[in-house]
């Protein structure tokens, strides 16, 4: 008997979600489709194993095979990113960031992080997050005139506030991040530098974005976005921080590692080490640029005027639409995006003035510049006319022509 027969309620919900993914154009910048092999490892019997500790130093018997798996994941990640030390146990990007804060800081220390509304992340100092509750946060933003990161202002603020740590990295910033420049600022201010590359990890791995690993003290990431692996996190650091980081992950803030997910991370890193992956990332960026150019040509304002990476942030104020309205209209037309604040957004976070659009998923499905032009046309007609019917047939037919991996 299978899940279908034993638990039709859960099976039905899973199947419905699979169909939803197949039939729509998923353009959430932080999502992707894993390979069948990553999925197989994630659904393996390794989920049953307890393995608190690290390879060769576990608190449970029977860990020989999971040690092999974790060592493979660590070795492959180190090779992929050129990292001196890797911890593959964080359950998520947030867990990786919590462990990194606790490895370097004491509660109450001053931290500079990018404001969520300017493209940062909750864990970079939002008042409702652990980061904002336990640390003194000095947020930084982007320039009001062009929405690019304001390195001069960050330097000035860092020299004045003397943070113990600066976090760079973003979840909604469409441009290259100058990690070298951040590193110079951190050194001058006497601060640690943490780079959170959750969104752009795949671009960094493929050499399509400047490398943070050489110039930052700690680098955190998720493994499920552009990297196209299982849902999870990871920390990379220099050797001198290795034991602090490892102790901070376990026993500092996690218990048993998810060995099935670590196996899937190893598979994902193996895939990303192959030549085709570089080509995939090159196509993700080319698609993003094409889509941005066509949307801009069609009259949609883009934050920073365009993109260098896998995502686009559209400012919808000139169309008289909020992000919430646009997300709903596009969903009805078969295109899934998320409402997103734009820098210095006058609207609340559940309303917003923008949407974030990403190309990783559709590139995995095999779409290219021609399809991006068609999608730009759909988005423009749906949003300009506030009419989802203008797009639903066209997006369904595109989805059918580029089947989602099963
Ligand atoms: N939720 C992720 C994103 O969509 O970017 C960030 O954690």
Image: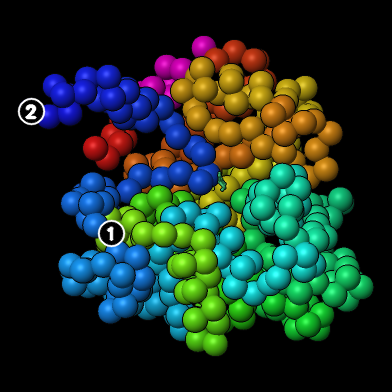
Picture coordinates of residue 130, whole percent (x, y): 67, 53
The crowding category of the residue bearing disc 2, from other C-alpha atoms within 10 Å (few below 14, some 14 to 19, many at least 20), is: few
Q: Is residue 58 above or below residue 171?
A: below
Q: Residue at x 72, y 65 (%)?
A: 107
Main SS of the magenta part reads helix
The crowding category of the residue bearing disc 1, from other C-alpha atoms within 10 Å (few below 14, some 14 to 19, many at least 20), is: some
Q: Cα distance, mark 2 to mark 1?
A: 27 Å
Q: How is the image coloured?
A: rainbow
Picture coordinates of residue 134, whole percent (x, y): 73, 58
Q: In this view, does 202 lie to the left or right of 265?
A: right
Q: Name the residue under label 1.
A: 50
Examine the image and state in which quarter residue 140 appears.
Answer: bottom right
Q: Which residue is drawn at 50% across and 30% down?
A: 336
Q: Is residue 281 above or below residue 296?
A: below
Q: In this view, does 401 lie to the left or right of 334?
A: left
Q: Mark 2 points at which residue?
A: 1
Q: Going by the picture, which residue comes out furthest to the left? A: 1
The total of numbered circles placed on residues is 2
Q: Residue at x 7, y 28 (%)?
A: 1
Examine the image and state in which quarter residue 168 appears.
Answer: bottom right
Range of magenta residues:
389-399
For marks 2 and 1, the one nearer the N-term is 2
Picture coordinates of residue 368, whole percent (x, y): 41, 44
């Amino acid at each position: 008997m299978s899940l279908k027969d034993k638990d039709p309620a859960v099976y039905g919900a899973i199947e419905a979600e699979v169909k939803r993914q197949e039939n729509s154009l998923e353009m959430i910048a932080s999502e992707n489709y894993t390979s069948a092999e990553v999925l197989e490892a994630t659904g393996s019997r390794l989920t049953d194993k307890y393995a608190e500790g690290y390879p060769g130093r576990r608190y449970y018997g029977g860990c020989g095979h999971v040690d092999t798996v974790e060592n493979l994941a660590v070795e492959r990640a180190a090779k992929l990113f050129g990292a001196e030390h890797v911890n593959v146990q964080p359950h998520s990007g947030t867990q990786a960031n919590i462990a990194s804060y606790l490895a370097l800081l004491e509660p109450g220390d001053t931290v500079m992080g990018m404001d969520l509304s300017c493209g940062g992340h909750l864990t970079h100092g939002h008042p409702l997050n652990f980061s904002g509750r336990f640390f003194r946060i000095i947020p930084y933003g982007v320039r009001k005139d062009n929405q690019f990161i304001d390195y001069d202002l960050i330097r000035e603020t860092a020299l004045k506030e003397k943070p113990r740590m600066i976090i760079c990295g973003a979840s909604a910033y469409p441009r290259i991040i100058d990690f070298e420049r951040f590193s110079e600022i951190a050194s001058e201010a006497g601060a640690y530098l943490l780079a959170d590359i959750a969104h752009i990890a795949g671009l960094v791995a493929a050499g399509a974005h400047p490398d943070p690993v050489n110039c930052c003290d700690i680098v955190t990431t998720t493994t499920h976005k552009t990297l196209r692996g299982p849902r999870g996190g990871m920390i990379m650091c220099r050797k001198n921080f290795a034991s602090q980081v490892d102790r901070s992950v376990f026993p500092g803030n996690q218990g048993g590692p998810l060995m099935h997910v670590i196996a899937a991370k190893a598979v994902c890193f193996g895939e990303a080490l192959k030549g085709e992956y570089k080509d995939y990332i090159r196509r993700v960026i080319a698609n993003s640029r094409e889509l941005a150019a066509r949307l801009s040509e069609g009259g949609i304002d883009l934050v920073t005027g365009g993109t260098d990476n896998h995502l686009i942030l559209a400012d919808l104020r000139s169309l008289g639409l909020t992000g919430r309205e646009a997300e709903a209209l596009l969903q009805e037309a078969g295109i899934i995006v998320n409402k997103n604040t734009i820098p210095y957004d006058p609207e609340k976070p559940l309303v917003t003035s923008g949407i974030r659009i990403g190309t990783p998923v559709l590139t995995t499905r095999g779409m290219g510049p021609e399809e991006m032009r068609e999608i730009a046309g759909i988005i423009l007609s749906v949003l300009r006319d506030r009419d989802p019917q203008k797009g639903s047939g066209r997006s369904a037919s595109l989805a059918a022509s580029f089947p989602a991996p099963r």
